[in-house]
Amino acid sequence: RVLLEARDLDVYYGDDQALQSVDLPIPEKQVTALIGPSGCGKSTFLRSVNRMNDLIDICRVEGDLEFDGKNVYDDDVDPVALRRKIGMVFQQPNPFPKSIYDNVAYGLRVQGEDDGDVDEQVQNALEQAALWDEVKDQLDSSGLDLSGGQQQRLCIARAIAPDPEVILMDEPASALDPVATSKIEDLISDLAEDYTVVIVTHNMQQAARISDRTAVFLTGGNLVEFDETAKIFEN
Ligand code: ADP
Ligand code: ADP
């Protein structure tokens, strides 16, 4: 089943076009990798999906972008609620300067959940992010005291706590050392059992290792190929 679908998507920054007539149907509960040279519009695509492009004044989005059959740019869509259903993880781990617990609890409290439920869901999210065993005895210490790889897993836990359907990841491992990278890669493969994952990476081997499907963009913002990853990397 297709969960996210771009149809004839054009994105502009002022007079410059960053994405050109992109048609991209993203299947549910798979890892889809977006690859291509720097500046080809990969981050712009992610930001179109969760409407972070709204926050860039000069950015204009045209065409259709459907999430679960509904255009995310329709007037009655609340971007903040949308971003809880479509979580995002960035290249630089960016935990809040708060405790580990509060980082994960933040989105749940915003939703007005009871404290007992919050405790349980914080633990669940940390377990799903493969971080619980490492932090369960230090939930009150600052998220900023963790290693880079742990901080990134904390950001993943924060994104999954509100029970999203999609997780967008923009080069989530490129600031990490090889051991931390390999942990994140294993985690991403596991996450696809429960979530639809869209990951931007400049690392072809990484795309080949962890994604089910790969979309190849070219300079100018054209999507030139989209297929099963094994087929894309066959040559
Ligand atoms: P990628 O993620 O593939 O490196 P981006 O989506 O970051 O590509 O950028 C695509 C194009 O849009 C580039 O030409 C970039 O300079 C331009 N761009 C990205 N963000 C902005 C912005 N906030 N303002 C103006 N131009 C931008
Ligand atoms: P990425 O390739 O991961 O998007 P960049 O280093 O290209 O990373 O961009 C980092 C930030 O700078 C992004 O938030 C992007 O929107 C912004 N940016 C990129 N290109 C431009 C541009 N030409 N003008 C203004 N902001 C830009």
Image (cartoon, rainbow, N blue to C red):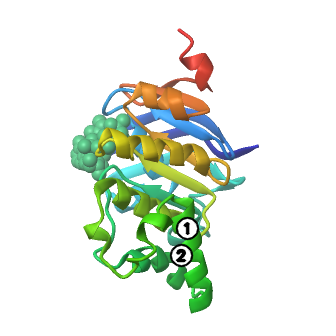
Residue 64, x across and y down, in percent: 60, 46
Q: What element carries label 1?
A: helix
Q: Using a 10 Å C-alpha cutoff, classify the residue at mark 2 as few (fewer than 14 neighbours), some (14 to 19) or many (20 or more).
A: many
Q: In the orientation shown, which residue stands out farthest toward the right?
A: 1
Residue 216, x across and y down, in percent: 49, 26
Left or right of 115: which side holds 14?
left
Q: Using a 10 Å C-alpha cutoff, classify the residue at mark 1 as few (fewer than 14 neighbours), some (14 to 19) or many (20 or more).
A: many
Quarter of the view holding residue 204: top left
Q: Which of 198 and 185 is in front in this view?
A: 185
Dot 1 amino acid type: Ala
**Ligand 2: quadrant of the figure:** top left
Q: Which residue is drawn at 45% across and 47% down?
A: 184
Residue 214, x across and y down, in percent: 55, 29
Q: Which of 64 and 150 is in front in this view?
A: 150
Question: What whole-number distance in Å separates the C-alpha atoms at marks 2 and 1?
Answer: 5 Å
Q: Name the residue under label 2.
A: 122
Q: Can residue 87 be seen in this view?
A: yes
Q: Residue at x 39, y 37 (%)?
A: 41
Q: Which residue is drawn at 42% across and 55% down?
A: 89
Q: Is mark 2 on a helix, strand or loop?
A: helix
Left or right of 52: which side holds 65?
right
Q: Nearer the viewer, residue 148 or 71?
A: 148
Q: Mark 1 points at which residue?
A: 125
Dot 2 amino acid type: Val
Q: Residue at x 51, y 35 (%)?
A: 33
Q: Assign the N terminus to one quadrant of the image.
A: top right
Q: Is the residue indicated by label 2 positioned so its CB lies within 8 Å of ligand 2?
A: no
Residue 172, x across and y down, in percent: 39, 47
Q: In the orientation shown, which residue stands out farthest toward the top?
A: 235
Asked whether disc 2 touches disc 1, contact meaning CB atoms under 8 Å apart, the reply is yes
